[in-house]
Amino acid sequence: MLSLYKKAFSGLSPSTWLLSLVLLINRSGNMVLPFLTIYLTQHMHMSIAQAGLVVGIFGVGSIFGALLGGRLSDKIGFYPIQFWSLFLNGILFIILGQMQTMLQISICTFVLSMVGDAFRPANAAATAWYSSPENRVRSYSLNRLAVNLGFSIGPAVGGMLAGISYNFLFWADGLTCILAALLMRVFLPPGKIVKGGAAADTTAQEIPKGPSAYKDVLYLLFAVLVTFFAMGFFQLGSIVPLYFKSALHLSEFYIGIVLGSNGLTIALLEMILVYKLEGTKPNLTFISRGILLTAMAYLSFNLLPAWGIAAWVYILFFTFSEMFSMPFMNAFWISRSQEHNRGQYAALYTIAYSVAQIVAPSLSAYLVERLGFRDWWYVVTGWCLLTSLGFMLLQRKFSAQNPVHNPL
């Protein structure tokens, strides 16, 4: 086991490690979003539908942020986008905690998500630049390790703070964003920028223009399927905590521990899993199988009694589904991008999640109020199964086009 860890983590650049440390600090403060639906319904006295609308507005802001972050990353470079996104996002989290009305919360949530999600395509471009082609997938997995380790800390601490005062969540989230920005500024060297906006070293030649990501039809199909996957994925941050609270009668602290175990398990196992699986099968095959596990996670809610054990079975299936799917989604989009259009590909990938974050919370809140949780979990299970089938068919399409060698 120790040998596997050593091999999985070896050969990554110091800058990749520093970038992951920035992410770890930032995500360790990820306390507001896992509890936002509970905060809005039980402390701001909104209906489930209103809370779903606010989370949906977060997704709208994410689309604008992803487009802006991807475009600016290609134009002026990933470094300033990451810094200002982190720093301003920290201030906005603190401001959000002071908002009192539905309108105030909605406007602040939109601006916060737009500023915050500009970070994601910039960070994806930075990871690609700081890594080498042979360890790029592991570099992205290291970032996910940092994100998920932080996610194991944030909800757990957030659950304890929520038991005291929800106001502490907003301050903790904001201050960790600002700390991450300052740490990046002090310790992480900025990438050099060549004419045309692509990050490169000081000896790099100007990178020629090439095809736009928005004309890559196969990648656009991939992005659509990612959107459907993300609609199931984002149940974890909206309806699932509410289900834990209202149907399973779990406390905020217990919910935080369950959600935090997702990140901790991924932090412990994902790098080894990627190291062992990478290259053994096409990326789309792993994605399809991972989404099958997502379907099983939601189906387990209806097959098990409404006790605390149901939360642990769900999170186990969900965690392994995430480890099988998301690292290989990153590997797929980066394999189709080049230096000059990496921000575009990263932006489209981010937008897929942003669209899901608009549709999923609002739709799920609306239908849960009318159908109840049980029928809703059957619906989510069904569309996860269809999404898995979609990725399987997409893989066959790639295989037909590349019958000899198909690394995708």
Image: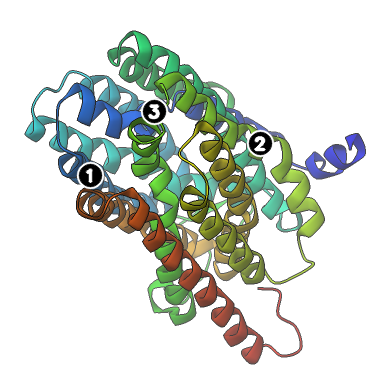
Give the amino acid type for the residue marked by disc 2 in the picture: Thr
Residue 202: tell me if it is visible.
no
User: Split into 4 quadrants, where in the image is the C terminus?
Assistant: bottom right
Mark 2 vs 1, N-terminal side: 1
Distance between the alpha carbons at the discs numbered 3 and 2: 24 Å
Q: Secondary structure at mark 3?
A: loop
Q: Which residue is disc 2 drawn over?
A: 265
Residue 249 numbered mark, or none: 3
Say which residue appears at 36% left-offset and 30% top-offset. Answer: 245
Task: Residue type at mark 3: give it.
Answer: His
Callout 1: SS: helix
Give the distance between the C-alpha atoms of the residues marked 2 and 1, in whole angstroms. Answer: 28 Å
* Circle nearer the N terminus (1, 3): 1
Q: Are marks 3 and 2 in contact (CB under 8 Å)?
A: no
Expressed as whole percent of the image width and height from the top left, the position of residue 392 reads 58, 77
Residue at 71% across / 34% down in the picture?
A: 14
Q: Nearer the viewer, mark 1 or mark 3?
A: 3
* Residue 28 rendering spot, x and y as whole percentages: 51, 24
Residue behind mark 1: 52
Query: In this image, 275 relative to 101: left or right?
Result: right
Q: Residue furthest front?
A: 305
